[in-house]
Amino acid sequence: MLKRIAIMALTGIFLAGNAFATPTDEVKKTVDEVVRIVSEKESKKNEQKRRQALKKTISVIFDYGEMAKRSLGKHWNQRTPAERKQFVDLFATLLENSYAGKIESYNNERIVYVKEAIDGDHAEVRSKVVTAKRDEFSLDYRLMNQGGKWMVYDVVIEGVSLVSNYRSQFNRIITANGYSELVKKLQSKSEEIKAP
């Protein structure tokens, strides 16, 4: 009886350990898949299909709602639920396209995972990208644990936070011309990207 309880307890620990991936595991899994997509010969022939595959992969780990909220900063609380939803959608399109655009220029760079720091429900995964010419730049991911899954809410490139950068741009536009002007700009950017 005791032996059976011990085996069940160990099995439970083992299964729980497998179900809960580390922040680095989550980031690495997504980055590996992204690299596979952009390196694939077939995907290079069909830009639209490749872009869709990239967006699908990125959206698994990027928490667009949290990123949009943080990017809008103090202006988020003044938005209605419908405005928030619209903004999250526009922000996701902006982010997917700018991130996918950068990824598509991938040229056999090496990604090295340097360090992981976990503080409660928050984590940071530090990595660096090493080019063929041995140039390096830092690429860090900030994540939040949501229901047992680590989700990215900010990306820091060479010490510059993506969310902070957008927040200052968005704040400038809203302060000068109002929230509707920001929506207009994001919509036209989204249309621009859709155009062939």
Image: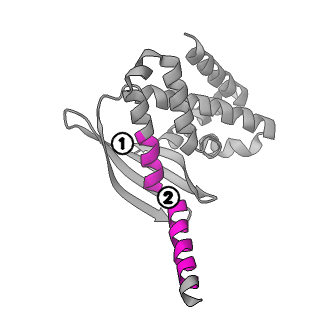
In front: 3, or 126? 3
Q: Position of residue 175 (x, y in %)?
A: 65, 33
Residue 47 in sight: yes
Q: Is residue 111 above or below residue 113?
A: above
Q: Earlier in the sequence, mark 2 or mark 1?
A: 2
Q: Amino acid at mark 2?
A: Ala
Which quadrant of the figure contains the N terminus? bottom right
Horizontal arrangement in the rendering, residue 110 relative to residue 94 (left or right): left
Residue 80 in sight: no
In front: 6, or 62? 6
Q: What is the C-alpha distance between the residues marked 2 and 1?
A: 26 Å
Give the residue at mark 2: 21
Q: Amino acid at mark 1?
A: Glu
Horizontal arrangement in the rendering, residue 46 relative to residue 87 (left or right): left
Q: Position of residue 111 (x, y in %)?
A: 32, 43
Q: Position of residue 44 (x, y in %)?
A: 41, 19
- At label 2, counting other C-alpha atoms closer than 10 Å, the crowd grade (few under 14, some 14-19, many 20 or more) is some
Give the residue at mark 1: 158
| Residues shaded magenta | 5-32
Most extreme residue toward the bottom, as rendered?
A: 2
* Label 1: element kind: loop
Seen at 55% across and 26% down, the residue is: 52
